[in-house]
Image: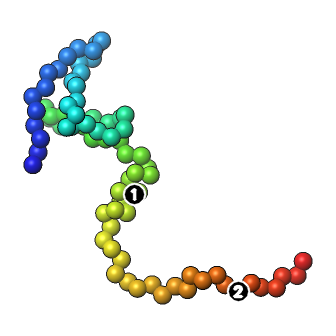
Amino acid sequence: MELERHVRIFKNGRNRAVRIPVEFDFPGDEVIMRKEGDKITMEPVKTKGESVIEWLRNQPPIEEDFDFDLREPPARDVDL
């Protein structure tokens, strides 16, 4: 379900601005703004770390059974 709300535009110096209602809030302090025809869309700026984590979250589970021996290998004699 998409949210919709009527908001007012106001002047802020030479710019026009709009207050973002709390239910439309973004994480972080920056957004990417695009103009598509007569529409303006905004999306949060993702940091590189967030995008990798998000990508990992969206990956399907690995079904393979990996047969790894995770024990430490035995110590070797070393000539000093």
The residue at 37%/63% (across/down) is: 56
In this view, 1 is above or below 74: above
Q: Amino acid at mark 1?
A: Ile
Q: Position of residue 8 (x, y in %)?
A: 14, 21
Q: Nearer the viewer, residue 68 or 40?
A: 68
Q: Is residue 18 left or right of residue 65?
A: left
| Image quadrant in which the C terminus is located | bottom right
Q: What residue occupies the far top of the structure in this picture?
A: 13
The residue at 20%/31% (across/down) is: 21
Q: Position of residue 74 (x, y in %)?
A: 70, 86
Q: Which mark is residue 74?
A: 2
Q: Nearer the viewer, residue 37 or 29?
A: 29
In this view, 12 is above or below 37: above
Residue 35 seen from this side: no
Q: Mark 1 or mark 2, which is nearer to you?
A: 2
Crowdedness near tag 2: few (<14), some (14–19) or many (≥20) residues, C-alpha within 10 Å: few
Q: Which mark is residue 53?
A: 1
How far apart are the two marked residues, 1 and 2, measured between alpha carbons?
35 Å
The residue at 29%/39% (across/down) is: 26
Q: Secondary structure at mark 1?
A: helix
